[in-house]
């Protein structure tokens, strides 16, 4: 499948991935994350159930301390 | 006859002698572009959550350009360690940040209305304090608080514009600081430089991100601004 991840085109050999699978695939191991799929926020408890499919627009933001 | 919006013009009454009689003539002057912008911005309200390195510097930038109302919130007091990056002065050490910042803003631009709240913000506070804001600026220190406000605004305040600051510790690396937008969420910072014992937050980079947040706020507020040039 082809998706847009953080405004960049990305290709995966899987047909679909859960959010946790996508994060593992991309080595995103951060504790504090905000994920949006097609503009909608996905809660952390739904990371194993919400799937990402071909054509989806995914935003992953890693939250870090400092300000 | 050209229709000129009120916020672009001001009137002066001139008393002149014409045909040997005193007459009053009203002359309309068009404001300079920067005055048009500040008059236009005066109708907007911006909420700032946190008054540390990001919040204090962002608030000052927004006050300088003339944003009408700022709603600031923080629970902390000014310490000597804050002065390496936050918009406070030595004689304000020990004072509540929200009170010191309101004073500093009003010394810069007395026409800005500042609502100051001495409190540690939770979900219900954000919904209540910032409901009437045109844009909210996230200016917290802790990652957990950043996550909380993002989730609150995206799920409970549909359509509300939120500008967050993520990643500004250390020095140098100016070229990796950037801004990206996803719907109503605007992210400023390098997204990688976390504060630690080896990587403190220092004035230059935190001010870059704070001013980038202010710049993003302007971009949002000035979307429909039409400068008047004759």
Image: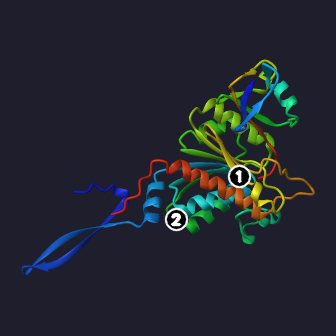
Q: Are the numbered discs 2 and 1 placed on the same chain, yes or no?
A: yes
Upstream in sequence: badge 2 or badge 1: 2
Q: Residue B120: image x %, image y %?
A: 73, 45
Task: Name the residue: 55% across, 51% down.
Answer: B219
Which dot, 2 or 1, sits closer to the camera? 1
Residue A49: horizontal and vertical position, in percent?
Answer: 78, 18
- The chain to which mark 1 is attached is B
Q: In this view, does B28 lie to the left or right of B180?
A: left
Which color scheme does this rendered protein use?
A: rainbow
Quarter of the image for residue B127 reads top right
Q: Please give the name of the residue rendered at 73% of the width and 71% of the height, measured from the top-left corner.
A: B91
* Position of B82 relative to A17 (above/below): below
Residue farthest along the left direction in this orientation:
B19
**B37 and B72: which is toward the camera:** B37
Image quadrant occupied by the N terminus of chain A = top right
Coordinates of residue B63 in the picture (x, y in percent): 56, 60
Label of residue B35 in the image: none
Residue behind mark 1 = B178
Name the side, left or right, on which B108 lies relative to A42: left
Residue A50 or residue B83, whichever sits in front: A50
Label 2 sits on residue:
B110
| Number of marks present in the image shown | 2
Q: In this view, does A11 lie to the left or right of B123?
A: right
Q: Where is residue B128 in the image (x, y as percent from the top left)?
A: 60, 38
Looking at the image, residue B158 sits to the left or right of residue B230; the answer is right
State the image quarter where residue A56 is shown.
top right
Instruction: In the rendered view, tell whether residue B16 sits above or below residue B224.
Output: below
Q: Can residue B35 be seen in this view?
A: yes
> Badge 1: few (under 14), some or many (20 or more) residues near its Cα, within 10 Å?
some
Q: How far apart are marks 2 and 1 (CA)?
A: 32 Å
């Amino acid at each position: 499948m082809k998706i847009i991840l953080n405004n960049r085109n990305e290709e995966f050999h899987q047909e679909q991935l859960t959010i946790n699978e996508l994060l593992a695939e991309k080595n995103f191991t951060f504790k504090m994350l905000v994920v949006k799929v097609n503009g909608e926020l996905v809660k952390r408890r739904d990371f194993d159930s919400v799937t990402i499919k071909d054509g989806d627009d995914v935003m992953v933001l890693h939250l870090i301390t400092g300000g | 006859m050209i229709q000129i919006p009120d916020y672009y013009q001001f009137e002066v009454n001139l008393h002149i002698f014409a045909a040997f009689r005193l007459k009053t003539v009203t002359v309309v002057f068009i404001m300079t572009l920067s005055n048009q912008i500040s008059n236009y911005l005066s109708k907007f309200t911006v909420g700032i959550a946190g008054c540390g390195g990001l919040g204090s510097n962002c608030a000052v930038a927004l006050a300088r350009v003339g944003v009408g109302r700022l709603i600031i919130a923080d629970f902390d007091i000014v310490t000597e360690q804050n002065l390496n990056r936050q918009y406070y002065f030595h004689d304000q050490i020990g004072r509540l940040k929200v009170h010191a910042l309101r004073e500093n803003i009003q010394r810069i631009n007395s026409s800005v209305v500042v609502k100051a709240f001495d409190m540690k913000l939770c979900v219900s506070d954000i919904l209540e304090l910032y409901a009437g804001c045109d844009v909210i600026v996230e200016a917290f220190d802790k990652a957990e608080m950043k996550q909380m406000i993002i989730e609150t605004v995206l799920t409970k305040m549909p359509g509300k514009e939120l500008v967050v600051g993520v990643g500004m510790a250390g020095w140098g690396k100016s070229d990796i600081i950037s801004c990206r937008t996803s719907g109503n969420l605007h992210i400023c910072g390098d997204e990688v430089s976390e504060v630690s014992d080896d990587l403190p937050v220092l004035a230059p980079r935190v001010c870059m991100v704070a001013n980038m947040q202010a710049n993003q706020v302007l971009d949002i507020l000035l979307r429909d601004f039409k400068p008047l040039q004759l």
